[in-house]
Image (spheres, helix red, strand yellow):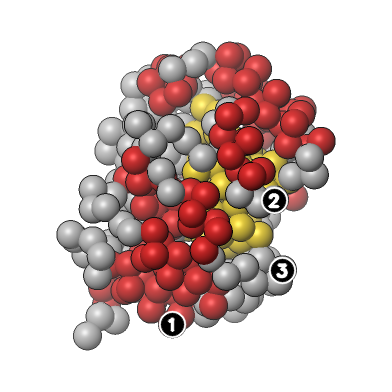
Amino acid sequence: MRVPPRVAIVEVGPRDGLQNEASAITTADKIAFIDRLSDAGHHVIEVSAFVSPKWVPQMADAAEVFAGITRHAGVRYTALVPNRAGLTRAVAAGVTEIGIFAAASETFSQRNINQSIDASLATYAEVCREALAAGLAVRGYLSTCFGCPYEGVIAPSQVARVAARLLELGVFEVAISDTIGIAHPGQVAPVLDAVTAVVPLAQVALHFHDTRGTALANVLAGLDYGVTTFDSSAGGLGGCPFAPGAAGNLATEDLLYMLDGLGVETGVDLARVSSASRFIEARLVHRLPSRYLQATSP
């Protein structure tokens, strides 16, 4: 198996992780959590989302969180943005990088954002045009790439088609995402074969959930393929509130433990990430699912 010498980790815990939590997390605790993740050496942290608080109430304080965090030099602090209204709020909050999120599944797109794939891409075309003109970087997330809770199997060719359209909008990277944790290692190469025929490998990231316990095996398949950017969530926080059965992002601690063991550099300190996870875990009504965190808990 081939592994790269260095991997970039995109920490999505504060947004993709917390958005699905039933417990109301205070703004001060979110800020403290993010600051701890910055101190752990993360280079990219997804801080929040400028979405409707009606649909995702946990993200209602996005501007306040951005205003309160201590920004480290060289660290990218990003936010998810669904439309031009969200972009306006993000720019006002001093955000310099945003994420947009499309789906490879038509049904999931309708259920998640109440738009068809084509309609969502038309919306994102406007968002990207304005964001890029304002000097913001734009990352694209593509959900349900390995399976959909409504449609089942998604053809790799369909994943590639939407990924190519995201690239045309001006995103610098496309995160190929396993929204419901259904992917297995045998799917990784075929999906990447299709995607990298239209998107350069260097602009492809992988985002796995660990619902069925296969996330790390999928990362290994991605590493062997040559992918060098992976999303993960401190403690294994979260899942998509609009995807049934999506609980369980890949835990950053579990990913770091494996990468450290393989001699792959990340620049992120495992002990400090674990400390940040324990901090936020104390504000929740349940234990975090990270296997490393559980194995090393007092």
Residue 101 vertical position relative to residue 268 in the rendered view, above or below: above
Res 44 → quadrant: bottom right
First in sequence, mark 3 or 2: give its number: 3
> Which of labels 1 and 2 is toward the front?
2
SS of the residue at dot 1? helix
Q: Which residue is drawn at 18% across and 59% down?
A: 285
**Residue 160 left/right relative to 131:** left
In front of the other: 273 or 18? 18
Q: Residue at x 62, y 68 (%)?
A: 71
Q: Where is residue 91 in the image (x, y as percent from the top left)?
A: 66, 43
SS of the residue at dot 2? loop
Q: Classify the position of the C terminus by image quarter.
A: bottom left
The amino acid pointed to by label 2 is Thr
Q: Where is residue 225 in the image (x, y as percent from the top left)?
A: 64, 52
SS of the residue at dot 3? loop
Res 169 → quadrant: top right
> Which of labels 3 and 2 is toward the front?
2
